[in-house]
Image (cartoon, rainbow, N blue to C red):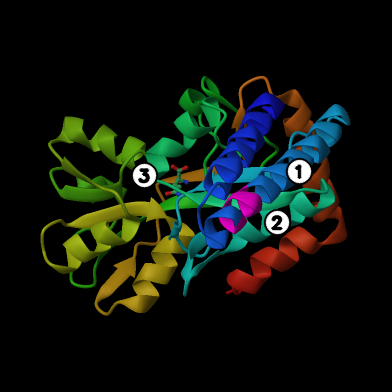
Amino acid sequence: MKKQVLALVMAAVMAGSLTACGSSAADTTTAAQAATTAQAEEKKEETETETEAAGDEDGVLVMATNAEFPPYEYHDGGEIVGIDVEIAEAIAEKLGKTLEVEDIAFDSIIPEIQSGKADFGAAGMTVDEDRLKNVDFSDPYTTASQVIIVKEDSDIAGPDDLSGKYIGVQLGTTGDIYATDYEEEGSTIERYNKGFEAVQAMLQGKIDAVVIDIEPAKVFVSQNEGIKILDEALTVEEYAIAVKKGNTELLEQINGALAELKDSGELQAIIDKYISAE
Ligand code: GLN
């Protein structure tokens, strides 16, 4: 890395000397600026190397998420906010790192962690047997359930009535996994990139029901007329943070931070800020 930076400085200096012969002062300034920037880069690089030696990668923790899942992660103006974002920020702070949030498709989160492009995934992600083959999960930080949203006048009154119906889900979610079981009973599963797109499709009469996590379900129902959540839930699940398989160092750090956040009441306070008690 350092060699590359040096090469850059050399190139800039050379460019500077080239333009110096009979060219404008402006060019020379640009070249000089480039050299300065390159030097600054080199300095930064040195600092980073020092931190690395102290066992701290680069001071940044990259969180992969899908910001279409209120109240856990969603867009608010230009910002990505929500329970998971605040929990991740609190963890990063405890670890002395800066949090960077990467908003990608839900089914890209695990590959992103596996490739090392993201340090962890926090996306209302349910701990699930199949996922455990590809990533490790932290201790759970909350429980959730899969619920069914239908139109208020629907003849679907519970899970058994989903047979033979058109069911909308968010692609790659546990809702998708559970709804897929109904294919054997003649149901058709429509998979959308965003949970809200499934709700819109139902409002337009394209599908009969949506299977999704309870909290986003509540948000979507509160924002739209004429739809409701059925009382009987399909499953109960636990949300946890996913890290690269075998990254026990980060996993232990996250679990330690989560335990502190639980003990101090901070975790509950973050949840309460977004979910009002019934
Ligand atoms: N809890 C669900 C899952 O893990 C949905 C998560 C999401 O859509 N962000 O698949």
Labelled pair 2, 1 in contact (Cβ < 8 Å)? no
Residue 28 sits in quarter? bottom right
Depth check: 34 or 255 in front? 34
Amino acid carrying label 2: it is Glu
- Range drawn in magenta: 29-34
At horizontal 39% and vertical 76% (from top left) the residue drawn is: 222
- Residue 261, image x, y percentages: 81, 54
Of tags 3 and 1, the one toward the viewer is 1
Work out whether mark 2 precedes mark 1 in sequence or the reverse, and give the earlier one.
1
Picture quarter with the N terminus: top right
Amino acid carrying label 1: it is Lys
Q: Which residue is mark 3?
A: 175
Amino acid carrying label 3: it is Gly
Labelled pair 3, 1 in contact (Cβ < 8 Å)? no
Q: Secondary structure at mark 1?
A: helix
Q: Which residue is mark 1?
A: 44
